[in-house]
Amino acid sequence: MTYSKPARTTTRPIRIRRIRVAGLLVVIAAIAAALGYQLPASWPSTAASPSDVLRGDHRGLRIERRLRGEPPGALGEADGAVPDGVTVFDDRYPAVANLDPALHGALRLAATDAAGDGVEFYVDSGWRSPEYQEQLFDEAISKYGSEEEAARWVATPNTSAHVSGDAVDIGRSDATAWLSERGAAYGLCQIYGNERWHYELRPEAVDHGCPAMYADAAHDPRMRQ
Ligand SMILES: [Zn+2]
């Protein structure tokens, strides 16, 4: 199967960077204000609204964690990290417990039936905190060389279906093969052609089958925010 090149959206990477910079300035300004520092008169006072910070800049959250004495990269199970061997039934992990209840229910139902075929569903990733998603996106930028290319593989914190608990990455290959064949009956659909492990709930798939996949996340209209 061949896919066309992803549509180039020249404004998007620039906008992400602008929001991040703007949000960072607000965070720094807030910290400075809390510490009683006067900011220089030239400091941009209207860089971003607080909601921009909440929606768009999780790097600021990480800086706050660092200020609280937490080491950088101290992202653990509370952020959605998953050790090896976790299944869809392991509710003690936030990555599993914080999934949307309908998605989680469909996964457990499918996993129960798959177990009858000798197939077990492992959760490679499920719900993720915004900080965790930001770290993954930053790593993808390093790996792929640009925000635009990274966006084909990893969503930003404000667009990721993992952050909202609406997506799960399933392993291993026997489980993804089982889901690719039978997942639609449970409303479980692969969304991106380049991510055979990434599943979301599409309840209408029970009657109508899964919708056509996007070639990759960059083709998903939800990612253009
Ligand atoms: Zn995924």
Image (cartoon, grey):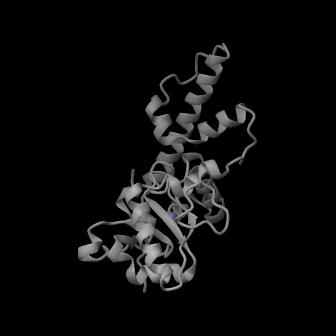
Name the residue: 58% across, 50% down. 134
- Horizontal side of 206 relative to 92 (left or right) equals left
Q: Nearer the viewer, residue 108 or 212?
A: 108
In the image, is residue 8 above or below residue 28? Answer: below
Residue 62 visible here: yes
Q: Quadrant of residue 185?
A: bottom left
Q: Residue 17: x percent and y percent?
A: 54, 45
Residue 79 lies, in percent from the top left, at 60, 49
Please state the horizontal and vertical placement of residue 154, each as a whole percent of the image.
Answer: 53, 61
The part of the image, by quadrant, that contains residue 8 is bottom left
Left or right of 27? Residue 216 is left
Residue 43's x, y, as percent?
A: 58, 22
Front residue of 116 and 17: 116
Please tell me which residue lies in front, 199 or 154.
199
Is 89 rendered above or below residue 131? below
Q: Is residue 153 above or below residue 63?
A: below
Residues 18 and 139: in front is 139
Q: Residue at x 39, y 55 (%)?
A: 224
In the depicted structure, whether residue 179 falls above or below residue 73: below
Q: Is residue 138 left or right of residue 98?
A: right
Quadrant holding the N terminus? bottom left
- Residue for point 46% across, 40% down: 55
**Can you see residue 8?**
no
